[in-house]
Image (cartoon, coloured by chain):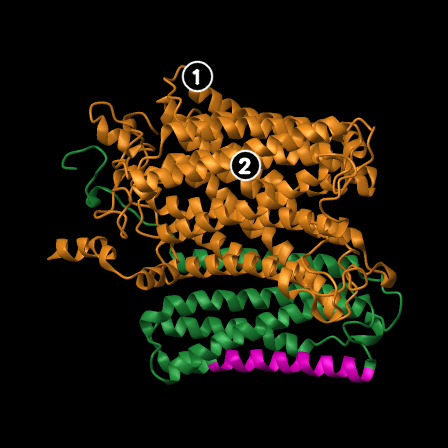
Amino acid sequence: MATESVTFPAALPISRPLVDRLHEWVTTVDHKRLGILYIGYALVFLCIGGIEATIMRVQLMVPHNDLVPPQVFNRLFTMHGTTMIFFVAMPIVFGFANYMLPLMLGARDMAFPRLNAFSFWLTAFGGLLLYFSVLGASGLYGAGNAPDVGWFAYAPLTSQTFSRGHSTDFWTLSLLVSGIGSIGTAVNILTTILCVRCPGMTLGKMPMFAWLILVMAFLVLLCVGPLTAAQIMLTIDRYLGGHFFDVQAGGSAVVWMHFFWIFGHPEVYVLVMPAFAIVSEIIPVFSRKGLFGYPFMVAAGLAIGFLAMSVWAHHMFTVGMSSSANTFFVMTTMAIGVPTGIKIFNWLATMWGGRIHFKVPMLFCLGFLFQFLIAGLTGIMLSAAPFDWQLGNSYFVVAHFHYVIVGGILFAVFGAFYYWFPKMSGWMYSEILGRLHFVLFLIGFHLTFDFMHIPGLLGMPRRIYTYEPGRGWDIWNLIVTAGVVFQGAAILVFVGGLVWAYFRRKPAGNDPWDAWTLEWATSSPPAPYNFAVIPVVRSRRPLWDLKHPEDPDWKYDQ
Amino acid sequence: MNASPMTMTAGELKWELPTRGRVGMFCLIAAETSIFVIFVVAYIFYIGKSLTGPMPREALEVPIFFTICLLSSSLTIHRAVKALWQADMRRFGRWWLATIALGATFLYGTAREWQRLIYEVGLTISTNLFGTTYYSLVGLHGFHVVVGLILLSAVMAFTWLGSVRHEHAYRVDVLSLYWHFVDAVWVVVFTVVYIIGR
């Protein structure tokens, strides 16, 4: 009788009408479904943000182009930045964290399933609110539609005087709403990791993924609050006549910058920690070796988390701070390179002497390693204040942070996608289409973002809608835009791969990679309850112990 | 999975983890703290930067009585939760009601203060920087008191309906953490607004 009640839900959906199935998705509190909702939602916004980026690149392809007017260009880069950070990068890492954490920790769900659903829907409505501005922001003034103040919305651009209508309010409210969703998710993740691990899984035996997601959630708790506070202040300024950022009444525009970047820089680590987490899972499995230097990886992750809270003002060197403030933020920013370097060397050492399998997830992780290294190196360059005075707000900076976010984070996320797709769907993806996706994206990425550094070095400022010919920027901008074609093609191949997997339905099996963490111990896709029997673990690689009873890890682990 | 080394019998292993409610509430408190920190920093940064009056010294009176009310409500809620752990429902109800009364008195004090500031002193949120920072910081705290009072009142209503029992002590305990946090924030707000800023 017990078996009957357990198998029942799996057999049910086949015969159900579409409305019922949709209703199930909307009302779900299952961490796996919410994870998929997060990921699907982020992929939709990835396409929207990508289209915005494409329009901007076509506009900048040649000098004096007039594809879009300057006002529309301002809206495009504001929407592109806001969308990609808040409605692509964050939801997609939350999605993977949501889906994977309970499985890896040997739990049946997150600590607070209903809070989980609530957080997702807040994030989802935040994104809708941002895009509703296109229709709803004209307001009484008949001015403006999409927000056009840039993704960090410096004062006084955001004051009522300079931003009529409601476009800035839509931006503010959408970030406020999705920020509350993010805090909810972070509370949930921290509580899950600390309170619902399966028996035997001490903190030191957790998968590295869980450790780094723990750091990520902690950073979200600390850094989203300031964003929320700053948005409340901005709303008070705009609607109640407050003076927080009103220079004429004694307020300060620089205070907004501080508050925004106290959020904005840890946010980078919020996004990159899950990338580290993903890479720390994939590289060992495809190198056929355990992760090198587990305690050091944990320590480096925590060190990055702490340092991340003290580097924000390196975004503000060009504003003109005191020399002692400049020195402090130069030092902390350079210091953060040390734990990051430790991580990179540990991943290399994991691969060293391993039998490396060059499957698609591993290819993306290798891309991540090299590109994140270069992104880190240009980061060290920009962390030197005098260098930043020269190149701040130029395309060099744009190239640097796209190297981090696309070359680092997005590559790792694609790796995660291919690595866990068999687990999430139960089907195998096409290795050929996956490789094609990787190669096209690699070519497109390097064409676009390698060559984007050069116009920056030559003095091209960011956020200009067009430029004069003959400044030496023309050919580089053309190459940068050419890369977009490859990136777009890569995304089409990616979608094609999804469609192929859907129709081909090649079964993947429970453990296609011969991996070691608990998510591979259950069926693909996992049943709603994840594990029929809650596992008990004795080492960091419980499935290794299971597969190699003659040589289990727990004999060597402390 | 018979004799595999991955599994152990539950008997071999003492396995206890922190409870979800407390950890979740502490996480929420951490996030709330970071919001308050930004408002407090803004308040301190803008002390003395108003270009026009009224200034804090001529506008503010130190609300000693209402502060005592709010801070002592931490004590009463502690007594209430203790009574609930001991399944003493009468004592729980009395202390819980006292907590609500003290919180409501504090809110009344804030309302009186704001009324005086707006109608007599002529200070509103748009008057000057002091007004902006004062109303937003004290208002943010007041908002948390309101949320707390709504939650406390819900528990009170359920208690009178007879649905709060000894086995809910843990949940009520977690809720009381939030109330302690609201009180602790007032200590900071009080220090910053009425002592340092005045």
Residue A277: image location, x then y, percent: 46, 36
In the rendering, at what x and y percent does residue A413 appear?
48, 37
The circle drawn on residue A488 is: 2
Q: In which quadrant is the N terminus of chain A drawn?
A: bottom left
Is B100 inside the magenta-drawn segment? yes
Name the residue beneath numbered marker 1: A352
Magenta: main secondary structure: helix
Q: Which residues are magenta?
A: B97-120
- Find chain A in the image and tell me its colour: orange
Q: Which amino acid does the dot numbered 2 rest on?
A: Gly
Vertical order, A375 against A104 (above or below) = above
For the point 37% across and 28% down, the residue is A431
Q: Which chain is green?
A: B
Q: Residue farthest to the right? A: B52
Quarter of the image holding residue A550?
top left
Q: Tell me the kind of residue under disc 1.
A: Trp
**What is the spatial separation of the Cα atoms under label 2 and label 1, in whole angstroms?**
34 Å
Question: In percent of the image, x 48 and y 44: which residue is there?
Answer: A93
Give residue A147's position: percent from left, percent from top: 69, 56
Total labels drawn: 2
Residue A155 is drawn in which quadrant? bottom right
Q: Are marks 2 and 1 on the same chain?
A: yes
Q: Residues within 10 Å of mark 1 (few under 14, many from 20)?
A: few
